Amino acid sequence: MKADGSIDPRSAPRLEGAWRWSGGSLTWIFEPTDGWEVEGVTDGLMIPFARDGVVVPPRPWSRPPLWSPVAPGDHWSVALPRTLIELTGARIWPTASDRPVLHPFGLLRFTIDPSEAGTRLCVAAWGEVDPSGADQTAIRALDELYHLVGSELAPIYRQAAEGRERGVDDEAWIEDNVHIVEEHYLRAPTPEGQSGKFGDAALWEISRRLVVRAANHDGTFLDVGCANGLLMESVHRWAAEDGLRLEPYGLDASARLAELARSRLPRWRERVFVGDALTWIPPHRFDFVHTMVDLVPQARRAGWLRRMLDEFVAPGGRLIVRDYEGIGERLRGWGLPVSGVTVQPRGDRQAQEAAWMDAPG
Protein backbone atom coordinates (compact mmCIF):
# COMPACT_ATOMS: atom_id res chain seq x y z
CA MET A 1 0.00 0.00 0.00
CA LYS A 2 1.24 3.49 -0.88
CA ALA A 3 1.69 6.34 1.57
CA ASP A 4 -1.54 7.95 0.36
CA GLY A 5 -3.51 4.79 1.14
CA SER A 6 -3.94 3.63 -2.46
CA ILE A 7 -2.90 0.15 -3.53
CA ASP A 8 0.33 -0.25 -5.45
CA PRO A 9 -0.35 -2.72 -8.30
CA ARG A 10 3.18 -4.02 -7.91
CA SER A 11 2.21 -5.41 -4.52
CA ALA A 12 -0.03 -7.96 -6.25
CA PRO A 13 1.13 -11.59 -6.07
CA ARG A 14 3.46 -13.23 -8.57
CA LEU A 15 1.62 -15.82 -10.65
CA GLU A 16 2.64 -18.67 -12.89
CA GLY A 17 0.94 -21.24 -15.05
CA ALA A 18 0.40 -22.44 -18.62
CA TRP A 19 -1.94 -21.84 -21.54
CA ARG A 20 -2.60 -24.97 -23.59
CA TRP A 21 -4.20 -25.51 -26.97
CA SER A 22 -4.29 -28.34 -29.49
CA GLY A 23 -0.95 -27.46 -31.08
CA GLY A 24 1.17 -26.68 -28.04
CA SER A 25 1.44 -24.78 -24.79
CA LEU A 26 2.58 -21.47 -23.40
CA THR A 27 4.28 -21.58 -19.99
CA TRP A 28 4.41 -18.25 -18.17
CA ILE A 29 5.38 -16.35 -15.04
CA PHE A 30 3.53 -13.11 -14.29
CA GLU A 31 5.22 -10.31 -12.32
CA PRO A 32 3.36 -7.10 -11.39
CA THR A 33 5.07 -4.01 -12.85
CA ASP A 34 4.15 -0.89 -14.78
CA GLY A 35 5.93 -2.19 -17.89
CA TRP A 36 7.08 1.13 -19.33
CA GLU A 37 10.80 0.80 -18.71
CA VAL A 38 11.13 -2.90 -19.57
CA GLU A 39 13.61 -3.53 -22.38
CA GLY A 40 13.36 -6.32 -24.91
CA VAL A 41 9.55 -6.60 -24.92
CA THR A 42 8.51 -9.05 -27.63
CA ASP A 43 4.74 -9.22 -27.11
CA GLY A 44 1.78 -7.38 -25.60
CA LEU A 45 -1.43 -8.62 -24.01
CA MET A 46 -4.41 -6.27 -23.76
CA ILE A 47 -7.60 -6.56 -21.75
CA PRO A 48 -9.97 -4.18 -23.61
CA PHE A 49 -12.85 -3.12 -21.36
CA ALA A 50 -16.02 -1.91 -23.02
CA ARG A 51 -18.42 -0.47 -20.44
CA ASP A 52 -19.55 -3.50 -18.38
CA GLY A 53 -17.80 -6.10 -20.51
CA VAL A 54 -14.71 -6.81 -22.59
CA VAL A 55 -14.07 -7.06 -26.33
CA VAL A 56 -12.84 -10.50 -27.39
CA PRO A 57 -11.80 -11.38 -30.97
CA PRO A 58 -13.26 -14.45 -32.70
CA ARG A 59 -11.77 -17.81 -31.85
CA PRO A 60 -9.77 -19.95 -32.47
CA TRP A 61 -6.83 -18.56 -30.51
CA SER A 62 -3.30 -19.89 -30.61
CA ARG A 63 -2.55 -17.54 -27.71
CA PRO A 64 -4.79 -15.64 -25.30
CA PRO A 65 -7.15 -13.12 -26.93
CA LEU A 66 -5.74 -9.70 -27.90
CA TRP A 67 -2.17 -10.93 -27.84
CA SER A 68 0.10 -8.94 -30.15
CA PRO A 69 3.70 -9.58 -31.25
CA VAL A 70 5.86 -6.45 -30.95
CA ALA A 71 8.24 -6.04 -33.87
CA PRO A 72 11.78 -4.73 -33.30
CA GLY A 73 11.65 -0.93 -33.17
CA ASP A 74 7.92 -0.97 -32.41
CA HIS A 75 6.46 -0.43 -28.95
CA TRP A 76 3.79 -2.47 -27.21
CA SER A 77 1.66 0.63 -26.56
CA VAL A 78 1.52 1.21 -30.32
CA ALA A 79 1.16 -2.45 -31.31
CA LEU A 80 -1.74 -3.23 -28.97
CA PRO A 81 -4.20 -0.56 -30.23
CA ARG A 82 -3.32 -1.53 -33.81
CA THR A 83 -4.02 -5.21 -33.11
CA LEU A 84 -7.26 -4.29 -31.33
CA ILE A 85 -8.56 -2.57 -34.47
CA GLU A 86 -7.38 -5.35 -36.79
CA LEU A 87 -8.94 -8.18 -34.79
CA THR A 88 -12.12 -6.60 -33.45
CA GLY A 89 -12.81 -3.24 -35.15
CA ALA A 90 -12.90 -1.56 -31.72
CA ARG A 91 -10.70 1.42 -30.91
CA ILE A 92 -9.00 2.76 -27.80
CA TRP A 93 -11.32 5.33 -26.23
CA PRO A 94 -9.23 8.52 -25.81
CA THR A 95 -11.74 10.25 -23.51
CA ALA A 96 -12.20 7.33 -21.15
CA SER A 97 -13.68 9.11 -18.14
CA ASP A 98 -11.23 9.16 -15.24
CA ARG A 99 -9.16 6.23 -16.49
CA PRO A 100 -5.91 6.20 -18.46
CA VAL A 101 -6.02 5.28 -22.11
CA LEU A 102 -3.80 2.25 -21.66
CA HIS A 103 -2.52 1.09 -18.29
CA PRO A 104 0.21 -1.61 -18.01
CA PHE A 105 0.02 -3.70 -14.86
CA GLY A 106 2.33 -6.67 -15.32
CA LEU A 107 4.96 -8.57 -17.26
CA LEU A 108 4.71 -12.17 -18.46
CA ARG A 109 7.90 -14.11 -19.07
CA PHE A 110 6.92 -17.07 -21.22
CA THR A 111 8.08 -19.87 -23.45
CA ILE A 112 6.12 -21.67 -26.15
CA ASP A 113 6.43 -25.38 -26.77
CA PRO A 114 7.19 -26.74 -29.30
CA SER A 115 7.37 -23.87 -31.85
CA GLU A 116 9.73 -21.38 -30.18
CA ALA A 117 12.93 -21.43 -28.17
CA GLY A 118 13.96 -18.98 -25.47
CA THR A 119 12.03 -16.75 -23.11
CA ARG A 120 9.86 -13.94 -24.45
CA LEU A 121 8.61 -10.85 -22.59
CA CYS A 122 4.99 -9.72 -22.75
CA VAL A 123 3.57 -6.56 -21.16
CA ALA A 124 -0.02 -6.96 -19.95
CA ALA A 125 -2.18 -3.81 -20.04
CA TRP A 126 -5.83 -2.90 -19.71
CA GLY A 127 -7.59 -0.10 -21.54
CA GLU A 128 -10.95 1.46 -22.26
CA VAL A 129 -12.28 0.94 -25.78
CA ASP A 130 -15.08 2.28 -27.93
CA PRO A 131 -16.90 -0.89 -29.02
CA SER A 132 -19.10 0.81 -31.65
CA GLY A 133 -16.95 -0.45 -34.52
CA ALA A 134 -16.84 -4.02 -33.23
CA ASP A 135 -19.13 -6.94 -33.90
CA GLN A 136 -21.44 -6.86 -30.89
CA THR A 137 -21.04 -10.61 -30.47
CA ALA A 138 -17.38 -9.89 -29.59
CA ILE A 139 -18.42 -8.12 -26.38
CA ARG A 140 -18.42 -10.60 -23.53
CA ALA A 141 -19.15 -10.41 -19.83
CA LEU A 142 -16.15 -10.57 -17.51
CA ASP A 143 -17.22 -13.90 -16.03
CA GLU A 144 -17.48 -15.34 -19.52
CA LEU A 145 -13.98 -14.12 -20.34
CA TYR A 146 -12.58 -15.78 -17.23
CA HIS A 147 -14.16 -19.02 -18.42
CA LEU A 148 -12.82 -18.61 -21.98
CA VAL A 149 -9.20 -18.08 -20.91
CA GLY A 150 -9.34 -20.88 -18.35
CA SER A 151 -8.48 -21.15 -14.70
CA GLU A 152 -4.72 -20.73 -15.26
CA LEU A 153 -4.91 -17.30 -16.93
CA ALA A 154 -8.06 -16.02 -15.22
CA PRO A 155 -6.13 -14.52 -12.23
CA ILE A 156 -4.27 -12.17 -14.60
CA TYR A 157 -7.52 -10.96 -16.12
CA ARG A 158 -9.01 -10.56 -12.66
CA GLN A 159 -6.07 -8.35 -11.68
CA ALA A 160 -6.81 -6.17 -14.69
CA ALA A 161 -10.49 -5.91 -13.73
CA GLU A 162 -9.60 -5.10 -10.13
CA GLY A 163 -7.11 -2.46 -11.25
CA ARG A 164 -9.72 -0.89 -13.49
CA GLU A 165 -12.27 -0.85 -10.70
CA ARG A 166 -9.76 0.62 -8.28
CA GLY A 167 -8.47 3.20 -10.74
CA VAL A 168 -5.00 4.73 -10.68
CA ASP A 169 -3.66 7.73 -8.83
CA ASP A 170 -2.86 11.06 -10.49
CA GLU A 171 0.84 10.26 -10.84
CA ALA A 172 0.25 6.93 -12.59
CA TRP A 173 -2.50 8.41 -14.80
CA ILE A 174 -0.20 11.15 -16.05
CA GLU A 175 2.78 8.79 -16.41
CA ASP A 176 0.75 6.37 -18.54
CA ASN A 177 -0.48 9.13 -20.81
CA VAL A 178 2.94 10.77 -21.14
CA HIS A 179 4.49 7.46 -22.24
CA ILE A 180 1.70 6.81 -24.75
CA VAL A 181 1.94 10.31 -26.22
CA GLU A 182 5.72 9.98 -26.53
CA GLU A 183 5.53 6.66 -28.35
CA HIS A 184 2.97 7.97 -30.84
CA TYR A 185 4.15 11.56 -31.33
CA LEU A 186 7.87 10.82 -31.57
CA ARG A 187 7.25 8.20 -34.24
CA ALA A 188 5.27 10.62 -36.41
CA PRO A 189 7.06 11.69 -39.64
CA THR A 190 5.73 15.28 -39.73
CA PRO A 191 5.84 18.27 -37.36
CA GLU A 192 2.03 18.17 -37.23
CA GLY A 193 2.06 14.52 -36.18
CA GLN A 194 4.71 15.22 -33.57
CA SER A 195 2.32 17.76 -32.09
CA GLY A 196 -0.66 15.40 -32.06
CA LYS A 197 -2.33 16.32 -35.36
CA PHE A 198 -2.29 13.58 -37.96
CA GLY A 199 -2.91 15.61 -41.10
CA ASP A 200 -1.13 18.10 -43.33
CA ALA A 201 -0.17 21.71 -42.63
CA ALA A 202 -3.45 23.03 -44.07
CA LEU A 203 -5.54 20.87 -41.73
CA TRP A 204 -3.27 21.90 -38.84
CA GLU A 205 -4.03 25.57 -39.47
CA ILE A 206 -7.77 24.96 -39.86
CA SER A 207 -7.82 23.03 -36.58
CA ARG A 208 -5.56 25.27 -34.48
CA ARG A 209 -5.65 28.85 -35.76
CA LEU A 210 -8.89 29.59 -33.89
CA VAL A 211 -6.78 29.79 -30.70
CA VAL A 212 -5.47 33.19 -31.84
CA ARG A 213 -9.03 34.56 -32.05
CA ALA A 214 -9.17 34.56 -28.26
CA ALA A 215 -6.14 36.89 -28.04
CA ASN A 216 -7.34 40.50 -27.76
CA HIS A 217 -4.01 42.28 -27.20
CA ASP A 218 -0.25 41.79 -27.39
CA GLY A 219 1.36 39.68 -24.68
CA THR A 220 2.87 36.37 -23.65
CA PHE A 221 1.33 33.03 -24.68
CA LEU A 222 1.85 29.75 -22.80
CA ASP A 223 0.92 26.49 -24.53
CA VAL A 224 0.30 23.86 -21.83
CA GLY A 225 1.01 20.48 -23.45
CA CYS A 226 3.23 22.01 -26.12
CA ALA A 227 4.69 18.72 -27.47
CA ASN A 228 7.20 19.64 -30.21
CA GLY A 229 6.42 23.37 -30.01
CA LEU A 230 4.58 23.63 -33.33
CA LEU A 231 1.66 25.55 -31.80
CA MET A 232 4.09 27.99 -30.13
CA GLU A 233 5.64 28.64 -33.52
CA SER A 234 2.31 28.81 -35.34
CA VAL A 235 0.61 31.16 -32.87
CA HIS A 236 3.55 33.56 -33.09
CA ARG A 237 3.17 33.68 -36.89
CA TRP A 238 -0.63 33.74 -37.03
CA ALA A 239 -0.85 36.51 -34.44
CA ALA A 240 1.61 38.62 -36.44
CA GLU A 241 -0.55 38.14 -39.53
CA ASP A 242 -3.49 39.45 -37.48
CA GLY A 243 -1.54 42.45 -36.26
CA LEU A 244 -0.70 41.12 -32.77
CA ARG A 245 2.57 40.26 -31.08
CA LEU A 246 2.41 37.10 -28.98
CA GLU A 247 5.60 35.85 -27.35
CA PRO A 248 5.32 32.04 -27.05
CA TYR A 249 6.22 29.75 -24.15
CA GLY A 250 5.57 26.02 -23.72
CA LEU A 251 5.09 23.40 -21.01
CA ASP A 252 5.08 19.64 -21.45
CA ALA A 253 5.19 16.71 -19.03
CA SER A 254 7.44 14.80 -21.43
CA ALA A 255 11.12 15.70 -21.21
CA ARG A 256 11.64 14.01 -24.59
CA LEU A 257 9.02 16.14 -26.33
CA ALA A 258 10.22 19.29 -24.59
CA GLU A 259 13.74 18.64 -25.84
CA LEU A 260 12.37 18.17 -29.35
CA ALA A 261 10.64 21.56 -29.05
CA ARG A 262 13.89 23.16 -27.86
CA SER A 263 15.86 21.68 -30.76
CA ARG A 264 13.21 22.86 -33.26
CA LEU A 265 12.98 26.35 -31.75
CA PRO A 266 16.46 27.22 -30.44
CA ARG A 267 15.67 30.94 -30.09
CA TRP A 268 12.95 30.01 -27.57
CA ARG A 269 14.86 27.18 -25.93
CA GLU A 270 14.71 28.76 -22.47
CA ARG A 271 10.97 29.28 -22.82
CA VAL A 272 10.13 25.55 -22.94
CA PHE A 273 9.45 24.09 -19.49
CA VAL A 274 9.13 20.48 -18.34
CA GLY A 275 6.50 19.73 -15.74
CA ASP A 276 3.29 17.91 -14.85
CA ALA A 277 0.46 20.29 -15.75
CA LEU A 278 -1.46 19.28 -12.65
CA THR A 279 1.20 20.35 -10.15
CA TRP A 280 3.57 22.67 -12.07
CA ILE A 281 4.13 26.14 -10.59
CA PRO A 282 4.81 28.79 -13.27
CA PRO A 283 7.83 31.10 -12.91
CA HIS A 284 5.57 34.04 -13.76
CA ARG A 285 2.09 34.73 -15.12
CA PHE A 286 1.20 34.81 -18.80
CA ASP A 287 -1.27 36.99 -20.69
CA PHE A 288 -2.73 34.02 -22.55
CA VAL A 289 -2.63 30.37 -21.48
CA HIS A 290 -3.82 27.64 -23.85
CA THR A 291 -4.58 24.03 -22.92
CA MET A 292 -6.77 21.01 -23.48
CA VAL A 293 -8.62 19.29 -20.65
CA ASP A 294 -7.30 15.78 -21.31
CA LEU A 295 -3.87 16.49 -19.80
CA VAL A 296 -5.15 15.60 -16.31
CA PRO A 297 -7.64 13.08 -14.89
CA GLN A 298 -11.28 14.03 -15.38
CA ALA A 299 -12.03 14.33 -11.68
CA ARG A 300 -9.30 16.98 -11.39
CA ARG A 301 -10.11 19.06 -14.46
CA ALA A 302 -12.46 21.70 -13.08
CA GLY A 303 -10.24 22.45 -10.08
CA TRP A 304 -7.12 22.42 -12.24
CA LEU A 305 -8.58 24.95 -14.69
CA ARG A 306 -9.59 27.22 -11.80
CA ARG A 307 -6.04 27.04 -10.45
CA MET A 308 -4.59 27.92 -13.83
CA LEU A 309 -6.95 30.89 -14.15
CA ASP A 310 -5.92 32.08 -10.68
CA GLU A 311 -2.19 31.28 -10.81
CA PHE A 312 -1.06 31.06 -14.45
CA VAL A 313 -2.97 33.91 -16.11
CA ALA A 314 -1.94 37.55 -15.66
CA PRO A 315 -4.57 40.11 -14.62
CA GLY A 316 -6.65 40.99 -17.66
CA GLY A 317 -5.46 37.86 -19.48
CA ARG A 318 -7.31 34.78 -20.70
CA LEU A 319 -7.27 31.03 -20.17
CA ILE A 320 -8.07 29.41 -23.54
CA VAL A 321 -9.36 25.82 -23.64
CA ARG A 322 -9.54 24.10 -27.03
CA ASP A 323 -11.37 20.90 -27.88
CA TYR A 324 -14.13 19.68 -30.12
CA GLU A 325 -17.32 21.71 -30.48
CA GLY A 326 -19.19 21.88 -27.17
CA ILE A 327 -16.22 22.46 -24.87
CA GLY A 328 -17.66 25.80 -23.77
CA GLU A 329 -20.84 24.15 -22.50
CA ARG A 330 -18.81 21.47 -20.75
CA LEU A 331 -16.81 24.12 -18.94
CA ARG A 332 -19.97 25.98 -17.94
CA GLY A 333 -21.36 22.70 -16.65
CA TRP A 334 -18.33 22.50 -14.35
CA GLY A 335 -19.19 25.93 -12.98
CA LEU A 336 -16.36 27.73 -14.79
CA PRO A 337 -16.77 31.39 -15.88
CA VAL A 338 -16.67 31.07 -19.67
CA SER A 339 -16.48 34.52 -21.27
CA GLY A 340 -16.66 33.54 -24.93
CA VAL A 341 -16.29 30.81 -27.52
CA THR A 342 -15.30 30.53 -31.16
CA VAL A 343 -16.05 27.57 -33.44
CA GLN A 344 -14.13 26.44 -36.51
CA PRO A 345 -16.06 24.17 -38.95
CA ARG A 346 -13.92 21.52 -40.66
CA GLY A 347 -16.13 20.15 -43.41
CA ASP A 348 -17.04 16.53 -42.71
CA ARG A 349 -14.80 16.48 -39.62
CA GLN A 350 -16.04 17.43 -36.18
CA ALA A 351 -15.74 21.19 -35.64
CA GLN A 352 -13.13 22.59 -33.29
CA GLU A 353 -14.03 25.05 -30.53
CA ALA A 354 -12.00 27.33 -28.27
CA ALA A 355 -13.57 28.70 -25.09
CA TRP A 356 -11.93 31.31 -22.88
CA MET A 357 -12.16 32.60 -19.35
CA ASP A 358 -11.07 36.12 -18.39
CA ALA A 359 -8.81 36.73 -15.41
CA PRO A 360 -9.85 39.70 -13.23
CA GLY A 361 -7.86 42.87 -13.60
Image: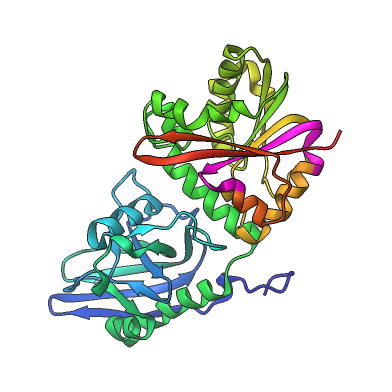
The x and y percentages for residue 147 are 31, 86
* Residue 327 colored in magenta in the image: yes
Residue 60 in the figure: left or right of residue 357? left
Total marks placed: 0
301 left or right, relative to 117: right
Residue 69 location, x and y as percent?
28, 57
- Between 334 and 39, the one lying in front of the other is 334
On the image, the x and y values in percent for residue 107 come to 43, 66
Give the quadrant of residue 48.
bottom left
Q: Quadrant of residue 109?
A: bottom left
- Residue at point 51% right, 65% down? 33
Q: Which residues are magenta?
A: 310-328
Query: Is 83 placed left or right of 126 in the picture?
Result: left
Please indicate whether residue 106 sits to the left or right of residue 271 in the image.
left
Quadrant where the C terminus lies?
top right
Q: Is residue 171 above or below residue 30?
A: above
Q: Residue at x 56, y 71 (%)?
A: 9
Residue sitting at 54 percent across and 39 percent down?
Answer: 353
Please, is residue 142 above or below residue 36 in the view? below
Above or below, 173 relative to 208: below
Does the magenta run of residues contain 192?
no
Asked whether residue 16 appears in the rendered view, the answer is yes
**Residue 312 position within the rendered picture, expressed as x and y whole percent measured from the top left:** 77, 38
Relative height, residue 195 to residue 233 (above, below): below
- Give the main secondary structure, helix, strand or loop, of the magenta stretch: strand
Q: Quadrant of the N terminus?
A: bottom right
